[in-house]
Amino acid sequence: MTNKIIDESRQGEVLNIDSDDSVSEKKLYIESYGCAMNFSDSEIVASILKDKGFSTTTELSKADVIFVNTCAVRDNAEQRVRQRLNDYRKVKKTKPELIIGVLGCMAERIKAKFLEEEKLVDIVVGPDAYRDLPNLLENAQDGRKAVNVILSKEETYADISPVRLQSNGVTAFISITRGCDNMCSFCVVPFTRGRERSRDPESIVQEARNLFDEGYREVTLLGQNVDSYLWTGGGLKKENPSPEELKHAVTFAQLLEKVALVHPDLRVRFSTSHPKDMNDDVLYTMAKYENICKYIHLPVQSGNNRILEMMNRGYTREWYLNRIAAIRRIIPDCGVSTDSITGFCSETEEEHQDTLKLMEEIKYDFAYMFAYSVRPKTLAERKFEDDVPEEVKKRRLKEIIDLQQKHSAYRTKQGVGKVHKVLVEGVSKKSEDHLYGRNSQNTTVVFPKGTHKKGEYVNVLAKSCTSATLIGEVVN
Ligand code: SAM
Ligand code: SF4
Ligand code: F3S
């Protein structure tokens, strides 16, 4: 059974997840757009509704409740959701008691339009109000207004044990922070998800332990800026913690170590790192533990200092390159990927060339690349003009994509002739006789099945490659 997760933040990526379709009276169909945080939130929603007797289904026609968990990071997302809502309305025509809801990052923005004006949906719920869902469902069933988009300074859903919608039973997400305090001028996330808050480290470690006991072998710690994780005994990160509070605080490097110590066979990944906050402590912790994967996603956004300043990213090109140098020094075999935006307000051709030159210098293993899309409420929308013509943005985007493809192919090729420790995730999409998994650096590795099974670690000698996949044989 597959349930689609469509990633708006990570261009073109579609994650297919499986769900538990056990027999139950009420069925929830949930479709998620956006980043891994949204995917992870859908698992929390499934858990909250499971307690109210719902199980998940992947068939629209069987659903009693349909939720779409939305993303607002770029403007094409809204049109896609509108199309999906029209599909859901068709189902509702044959089943009037069906409840349709919009969750997530678009909730605040569309509540007036979709719920009140156009009556396209019955429920609208923001990312911090999922505990209110049972109550809102009751309201909607009684024909009453069902909307809650209030953002919280404390909510981390720390006590909720997510229903894993992912099928492979090997890899899972764990949220460690919610919201974002960074205010990058192009970004809508601080407005859709509110203030940054860190989750109790004990609940994170416990979730990792439970996952390991259930057979999972990899966890990815999630936050918009994992490096600013700081637990000082309360949910909201204190602006100016006292020296005494800091003595008892848990930093991201310390949290990473706690999770790595759960079990040597539990791999640990994390996303997203922020160049202004990623310190050497994190890198030394990564180097110290074999089970912390040697892979860092470090979004640069632009290679030009004037644009970086307008973006309010809090670092310069030189600072960023210094962080890359630290990674290469402390973890020489580390994979590095990035996010990049072309055509930000007033970006000149030369400034665009600076991004290309930076990419040439670093040669990322992988990158998510986007054309700038103006977002409501953001600093850039209020202060700057979106003046780079669409065709120029697209042309620049194509140039960085073409260059990145060359670099990805180059990096993958470097893995040929080497032995990679691979966590088996399942059967290869292209061949039933092959399994696939990833190495520590996050590169996909495909190899003949033999007697191996998912959840096992195998050593694979890479003999050849495509642009993004290593192909080899097990040499255990
Ligand atoms: N917190 C992460 C960080 O600081 O890099 C990323 C969060 S954002 C959800 C994912 C990516 O979407 C960003 O890194 C950026 O490249 C892209 N993005 C965000 N806002 C955008 C916009 N208005 N237009 C185009 N791309 C955008
Ligand atoms: Fe958006 Fe910047 Fe926060 Fe990332 S760090 S979520 S880009 S505001
Ligand atoms: Fe989109 Fe919200 Fe994630 S805007 S990228 S789903 S935090």
Image (cartoon, rainbow, N blue to C red):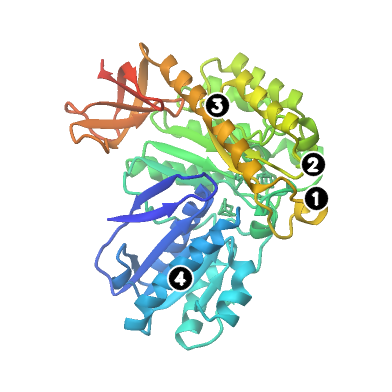
Q: Is residue 165 left or right of residue 389?
A: left
| Residue 6 rendering spot, x and y as whole percentages | 45, 52
Note whether 267 is above or below 12 in the view shown: above
Density class for disc 2 (Cα within 10 Å; few <14, some 14-19, many ≥20) is: some
Q: Secondary structure at mark 1?
A: loop
For the residues labelled 2 and 4, the Cα–Cα distance comes to: 36 Å
For the residues labelled 2 and 1, the Cα–Cα distance comes to: 9 Å
Q: Which residue is mark 4?
A: 85
In the rendered structure, which disc, 4 or 1, sits on the residue that comes first in sequence? 4
Q: Secondary structure at mark 3?
A: helix
In the rendered structure, which disc, 2 or 4, sits on the residue that comes first in sequence? 4
In the rendered structure, which disc, 3 or 4, sits on the residue that comes first in sequence? 4
| Residue 96 rendering spot, x and y as whole percentages | 37, 85
Instruction: Assign the C terminus to one quadrant of the image.
Output: top left
- Identify the amino acid type marked 1: Phe
Q: Nearer the viewer, mark 3 or mark 4?
A: 3
Q: Is mark 3 within 8 Å of ligand 1?
A: no
Q: Which residue is mark 3?
A: 403
Q: Which residue is mark 1?
A: 384
Tell me which residue sits at (30%, 19%) in the image.
460
Tell me which residue sits at (78%, 39%) in the image.
244
Q: Which mark is residue 310?
A: 2
Of 266 and 413, which appears nearest the observer? 413
Note whether 158 is above or below 118 in the view shown: above
For the residues labelled 3 and 4, the Cα–Cα distance comes to: 37 Å
- Tell me if I can see residue 71 in this picture: no
Note whether 354 is above or below 181 in the view shown: above
